[in-house]
Image (tube, coloured by chain):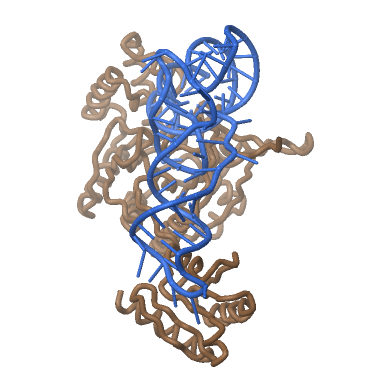
Chain colours: A brown, B blue
Amino acid sequence: MIKTYKSIRGTYDFSPEEACQFNKIAEKARHIFALYGYNEIILPFLEEEGVFVRSVGETTDIVEKQIFRIAKRNDSDSDIVLRPEGTAQVVRYYLEHALYKQSDFNKFSYIGAMFRGERPQKGRLRQFHHIGAEAMGSDSIFLDAEMISLALRLLDEIGITERKLNVNTLGCQVDKEKFMSLLKKDLSARRNELCPDCQRRLLKNPLRILDCKQENCKKIAISFCLSETTGKTYLCDDCNNKFQELLKLLKSSNIDYVYNPCLVRGLDYYTNTVFEITSTALGSQDAIGAGGRYNNLIKNLGGPDIPASGFALGVERVMLALNKSQAQISPDVFIAVIGENLRDEGFKMLRDLRSAGVHCDMDYCAKSLRGQLRYAEKKDINFVVIVADEEYKQGLVILKDMKASTQDKVKKEDLIEVVRGAIADGEGAA
RNA sequence: GUAGGUGUAGCUCAGUCCGGAUAGAGCCCCUGACUGUGGCUCAGGGUGUCGCGAGUUCAAAUCUCGUCACCUACCCCA
């Protein structure tokens, strides 16, 4: 028995229709990125492990459990991994080429596959795609507002209207640490009321307690957040003022947002503004896009102290939320041939029509005329050129309009012009 | 890593509880009726490791155990 193969767990095959949808999303994203001044870069799938350990955070699951490592070719090789996310990699690129020396402000966008060894479920794959943007060199709230409005604009353009925007601020590094220690102190006292997962988080990553899904933990988290944020006990004046200004700016830009004091991000590098866009069309993996400010990341990866902000959309999640089946792309013209002896004439016509830019195809399976017409019908092809012996002797072919159920005899040499005219008429009518 | 659910034709599924002879349906696809014309109709067209492996039994898709895969949720995150 010969072994048969299946796709690797957590990978996904895009069908022609899905690939078409994917490409349309990418095309729209590129258009909007250009409009907003973000230049696309294409970076490798492979990256040195340290890039992510020192940015995303050693204790995050992404680094601790989900990294795909590539086998070393020899002992002197560094630890190579498949990239689990884009931001840290873009920063590596930015630093390696010392782009801050050429310009004090840089904007980049990227579209590409990311890899995480998670357990697959709805909206969660091991190989998936991010569409992202990063901007380095500004601490302005106008940049944060641009990031948020850019992410929303992309979703608008793609056609996702059912969505919710959550925003919050973690404060600068000092504030964030202060907040975490307050959180730790407060919740340690109520440790027994927390779920086992949260008891673990308390030691490892206390911020994550704030978005636990257990009802009881949620209540505790909310009451803590409200008391801390209303009292502003952790946020310094500068961070607080900036965040209030950002909210005002969002409001004046007519962006609907929900201020969610419990919103945190799982990656260590985030500071200050964080945001997340969710869709109810998904399952429990409902974030279709997220991002925020990462003012310490560039410094932590060995660069100068430069502030930055960014976000990413999950393409597969966006496609799930869109839930729109994409029509197949069908040719405009099909060439049906009666009898094998005219097949090479049909093939020549096919070539000439294609040279003239007409989207067309023919039968490769020696089907009967009936079979060929059935095929054209199934593929939703509007025009069929029938090459038949009797007419061909007189220098004619039959052009059949499948929608109108009419047909005319056309001179061979006029075929291209007539076909073009017919297609143009069809498009005009539609 | 944890929990629950599901694995039967290319697809969607019935049959499993309560074991019984060649394992079914719909969809899709192909052929023909129509020797040169699609859609409608009708008639044909299936060698399916019943996920895999053991066990129980005269007999297993059906019962037991193991195992693998997928789905959903936890977790994590886009």
User: Is A85 on the left-hand or right-hand side of A185?
Assistant: right
Q: Is A279 in front, or is B16?
A: B16
Total tally of numbered discs in the picture:
0
Where residue A25 appears, as percent x and y from the top left, is 42, 57
Choose top left, top right, bottom left or bottom right for residue A179: top left
- A82 shown above or below A419: above
Q: Quadrant of the C terminus of chain A?
A: bottom left
Q: Which residue is drawn at 42% across and 79% down?
A: A400
Where residue A358 appears, as percent x and y from the top left, is 50, 78
Q: Residue at x 56, y 51 (%)?
A: A94
Looking at the image, can residue A147 be seen?
yes
Where residue B26 appears, as percent x and y from the top left, is 38, 45
User: Is A88 on the left-hand or right-hand side of A81?
Assistant: left
Q: Residue at x 54, y 91 (%)?
A: A395
- A334 shown above or below A260: below
- A219 shown above or below B14: above
Where residue A424 appears, as percent x and y from the top left, is 38, 81
